[in-house]
Image (tube, grey):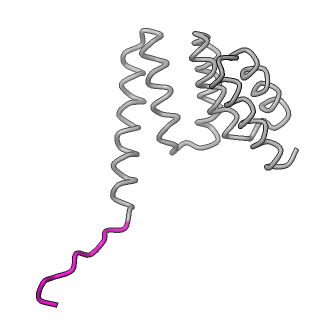
Amino acid sequence: MDDGTLLDGVEEATLAFSLGDVSLAASILEKITKDAPDYFEAWHALTEVRFAKRDLEGATHAGEQALRLQPSDLHVHVSLSRIWAERGDKKRAEEYGAKARVLGWQAELDEPVEKESSPLG
């Protein structure tokens, strides 16, 4: 599968999820992650779909796979923080939440700063 086909699959799963067909979304994403185990977008989407299905163990696994592929992704850290909070592990939830905050601050610092024009020229 090429990246365009994979992205189409993730978009199809996202549409199914948006229309309330969580099982179809999960099925599509599970196939993609089986066929392309290094496709980050599918793992991240599967994390959210499994979380919505209350499959906390499956959501954790998918989130960890996404994190393995992109360890500095802010959104995956937020997802894992929410999952661990729901699982009742406050310590892990706080660890992922703290990492997400740091990544958010880093992203803000990395943004170019627009120079304000001076009224003097």
Q: Position of residue 16 (x, y in %)?
A: 71, 25
State whether residue 57 is above or below residue 42.
above
State whether residue 86 is above or below residue 7.
above
Residue at the image point whose x is 80% and y is 32% from the top: 32
- Queried whether the magenta region covers residue 118, the answer comes back as yes
Towards the viewer: 111 or 88: 111
Which residue range is magenta in the image? Answer: 112-121
- Queried whether the magenta region covers residue 32, the answer comes back as no
Of all residues, the one furthest to the right in this rendering is: 1
Relative horizontal placement of residue 54, taking residue 8 as reference (left or right):
left
Of all residues, the one furthest to the bottom in this rendering is: 121
Say which quadrant the C terminus sits in. bottom left
Q: Position of residue 103 (x, y in %)?
A: 40, 45
Quarter holding residue 52: top right
Residue at the image point whose x is 42% and y is 13% from the top: 89
Residue at the image point whose x is 42% and y is 9% from the top: 88
Say which quadrant the N terminus sits in. top right
Q: Position of residue 99 (x, y in %)?
A: 40, 37
Relative horizontal placement of residue 51, taking residue 7 as reference (left or right):
left
State whether residue 27 is above or below residue 6.
above
State whether residue 113 is above or below residue 48.
below
Quarter holding residue 51: top right
Relative horizontal placement of residue 15, taking residue 89 as reference (left or right):
right
Towards the viewer: 100 or 49: 49
Of all residues, the one furthest to the front in this rendering is: 19
Quarter holding residue 66: top right
Q: Main secondary structure of the magenta part?
A: loop
Residue at the image point whose x is 53% and y is 34% from the top: 76
Q: Position of residue 53 (x, y in %)?
A: 61, 12
